[in-house]
Image (spheres, rainbow, N blue to C red):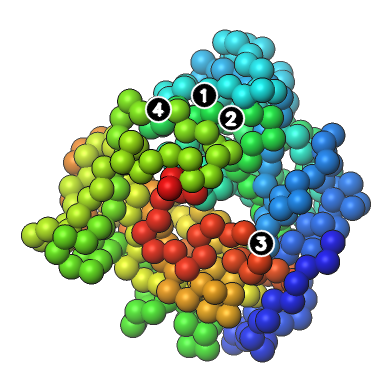
Amino acid sequence: MTRPDTGTEPALRSHTGLVTAGRSATGILPAHRIDDLIGRQSIQSSHPYDADQVQPASLDLRLGPVAHRLRASFLPGPHARVTDKLDRLKLHTIDLTDGAVLETGCVYLVPVLERLALPHDVAASANPKSSTGRLDVFTRVITDHGAAFDTIAPGYRGPLFVEISPRTFPVLVRLGSRLTQVRFRCGDARLSDEDLAVLHAETPLVDTDPAVFENGLTLSIDLMREGPGSLVGYRAKRHSAVIDMDAKAAHDVLDFWEPIRQRGEPSLVLDPDEFYILVSREAVHVPPMTAAEMVAIDPLVGEFRVHYAGFFDPGFGHAPAGGGGARAVLEVRSHEVPFILDHGQTIGRLVYERMLEPPQTLYGQGIGSHYQAQGLKLSKHFR
């Protein structure tokens, strides 16, 4: 598969020499190396691959033909396969071939079309796709003998399953729907705070000064935007119609979301168990030789969760790839008690990792990326 030239900048360097334009001993596999895994049958599928299934630093997983409604979520543990526990926990099985609705408050397990036979030095992790997280659809990948969600051990050989739990909106899915993604890596590719500080000095990671690095790049919330009356976020409506997960620009925003506008003090009370779409104060940059992931902040600083769709591909917010000024859109849910967010309050962290090799494709560069150069933006399903 031929991929366009990235037009990337010269070599990025850190004081450790870990972020360079050449191949690293550890790092995230770029798209052309994922293609190699497919070619070597380290990634397998009984169905032909979608043309856009391989992203700049990840692979979209596609739902298989059935969904099992579960009475409870589970992990198989190190001594069992998923199917060993499935018969005991499933309530019924739904045919997805022609599409089916997954209801809110329910847990489903879907075998995906892809299975893995990874090399011994390649591991993987999973996350919901951006469009999935922005709909409050909670997904997690599990494997045979798995002791943790969204974690695929080095050298794993076997099937993959995705657990799906719609929290706010009922959703229509079908065979081939893509709700989650997998990122492959060799070794520990994470950049330390010291590495990030050096990288930021050479190619800014955010447009605010000073940048704060505390086990990753710290992000804060924007509740002022353009001033009084401006849109600062959305609160999801309950008891909505069904959202088709494969339909773009098919739904009216106001049928599903309540706009939140800035007035008075730049703060927002998060109601328990409500779902919000908010945006970072900082414009974020993921340089071409890195990839990033949003991680939850320390619960000691706030009774809320920010983390559904966590992967940021190389080139997100990269000006030569059309991403200058891109904000991080945040999927926020409060825990148990009301919680007040103030403008500028810390709300999340971006953990950066080095790429194994220079990517041949960047996010937003001629591949139909929906969220490059984004501000406050809902998922692609809304017009």
Label placed on residue 288 = none
List x then y, in percent, for residue 99: 62, 24
Mark before the other along the chain sequence, 3 or 1: 1
Q: Residue 367: which numbered mark, if any?
A: 3
Question: In the rendering, at what x and y percent does residue 177 appear?
Answer: 64, 36
* Measured Cα–Cα span from mark 1 to mark 4: 12 Å
Measure the alpha-carbon separation of dots 2 and 3. 23 Å
Q: Nearer the viewer, residue 321 or 343?
A: 321
Amino acid type for the residue under numbered disc 4: Ala
User: Mark 1 = which residue?
Assistant: 102
Circles 2 and 1: CB atoms closer than 8 Å: yes
Position of residue 72 relative to residue 178, above or below, is above
Q: Residue at x 79, y 45 (%)?
A: 49
Characterize the local packing of mark 2: few (<14), some (14-19) or many (20 or more) Cα atoms within 10 angstroms: many
Q: Which residue is mark 4?
A: 241
- Residue type highlighted by circle 1: Leu
Precedes in sequence: disc 2 or disc 4: 2
First in residue order: circle 3 vs circle 4: 4
**Mark with earlier residue (2, 1):** 1
C-beta proximity under 8 Å, tags 3 and 4: no
Please give the name of the residue rendered at 74% of the width and 61% of the height, measured from the top-left corner: 31
* Mark earlier in primary sequence (2, 3): 2
